[in-house]
Amino acid sequence: MSSQSSARPRPQPEGGWISRYFELQPLRTTIRKELIAGVTTFFTASYIVIVNPAILKAAGIPYGPSMVATILTAFVGTLAMGVYAKRPFAIAPYMAENAFIAYTVVGVMGHSWQTALGAVFIGGLLFMLLTVLKVRSWLADAIPQSLTIGFTVGIGLFLTLIGLEGTGIVRSGGQGALLHVGDFHDPATLLAIAGLILIGWLVLRKIPGAFIIGILATSIVGFVTGLAERPEAWVSLPPDPTPVLLQLDIAGALSWGFFSVILTLFVMGFVDTLGTLLGLAYKADLLDEDGALPEIERPMLCDAVATMAAALFGTTTAGAYLESASGIEAGGRSGLTAVVVALLFLSALFFAPLFGAIPAYGYGPAVIMVGFLMLSPITRLDFSNLSEMIPALTVIVLMSFTMNIGIGMTAAFVVYPVFKLLAGRRRDIKPGMWVLGALSLLFFVFYPY
């Protein structure tokens, strides 16, 4: 009897090898939650498939091949993030860097987009070398928790503003103010507000898949009422990528005249990824007791590989994506979320007309709600300690007001040691923070305003 009992196989965790590989039980998540989170993140971030090539078109990069490059970059980077780093973060081309390449490097400075992509590749190579040598993780460990909180809240406000403007609830420009209330006579704006209320109600009721339900429901109403054009086709073959594939000019980017461009791309990419990783990890409760992300080299290596792949495919700097916060809010905690996102990005090669048909007022409310939910960590900021509070608020204010994550973070890296010195608390400054402060000063000196 006892031998029969001992021979019985031990009960396997739900999900078998998938659950074991992605450590779902220790992370208190399930396959179902991860699937919903992956779909949610994808639909929140899928706009990049359309928006990124639209921006890079201003640099002369052909739209169709650029779309393929965007999708392949997101697939490779996000799959690596899920399988290797085992984190619930999507990777895709960054919005700020693509605009910098299109409108500044090519539009103002007059360089070719091929040379700009060469600079992107060099930046990715530098990221990889510094990651392998653990310099990037050493720098990350130097960042105090107050700034990590600032990153999270700043990203939240940044997302909120993007969502508000994209849905028409808030509009920029005009007389007398930088921002104005939108046109509430516009049916699309009213539908976005309804979508925001719907998502808020679903989140309040803790309904699984609240974000994806809101995105789909709002989009379907738009299609039915004619506010949004239905896709002309559900499936199509991807465009030919050869006009941008392997077209980067590395030799041209190694000239001295390109130093400011490489430095700007390097610092922007470094701080964007670092701030996004720490902010998202904070929200997902993946940080340790010291406020650090364990094995941070793994996700950093993924974004380095993704950036190098992006340049080879024909697009700009890639890294961890802010919109991953929507999947985290939906319950995503493991790399399985990222694997789902990666596969959906790959499917976009053939379903681009469908994904591209989702209107801004469809995914915008989800972006706004994610931004709202990311503001909560500000309650953990010690407002009585001005040497911690002022640098943290510098991040929050400049990230959201300049709509540039890199500007907010680099300013904080300069302000933090300054205020620690003024407060007579030099010992609070870790060696890595001095390096970050010096790099940030160089960023502002050489940034092509």
Image (cartoon, grey):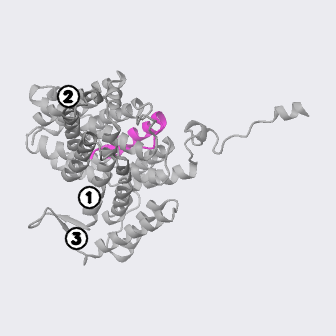
Question: With 445 as the anchor, is 201 left or right in this view?
Answer: right
Amino acid of disc 2: Ile
Residue occupied by mark 1? 161
Q: Quadrant of the C terminus?
A: top left
Q: Secondary structure at mark 3?
A: loop
| In front: label 3 or label 2 | 3
Tell me the distance, in whole angstroms, between the alpha carbons under discs 3 and 2.
45 Å
Residue 91 belongs to magenta span: yes
Q: Report the residue that reaches farthest toward the right.
A: 1
Disc 3 residue type (three-letter):
Gly
The secondary structure type at the circle numbered 1 is helix
Q: Is 278 or 340 nearer to us in this picture?
A: 278
Where does label 3 land, which residue? 182
Image location of residue 406, percent across then percent down: 23, 41
**Mark 1 or mark 2, whichever is nearer to me:** 1
Where is residue 385 drawn, in percent x and y? 29, 42
* Position of residue 103 measured from the top left corner of the image (x, y, whole percent): 13, 47
Q: Is residue 131 visible?
A: yes
Q: Tell me which residue sits at (33%, 45%) in the image.
A: 382
Q: Is residue 81 above or below residue 127?
A: below
Q: Earlier in the sequence, mark 3 or mark 1?
A: 1
Which quadrant holds residue 306? top left
Q: How many angstroms separate mark 3 from mark 1 (CA)?
A: 13 Å
The residue lying toward the viewer, choosing from 69 and 416, is 416
Q: Residue at x 32, y 66 (%)?
A: 361
Q: Which mark is residue 250?
A: 2
Residue 248 forms part of the magenta stretch:
no
* The residue stretch that appears in magenta: 68-94
Contact flag, marks 3 and 2 (Cβ < 8 Å):
no
Along the line of sight, which residue is nearer the eye, 408 or 119? Answer: 408
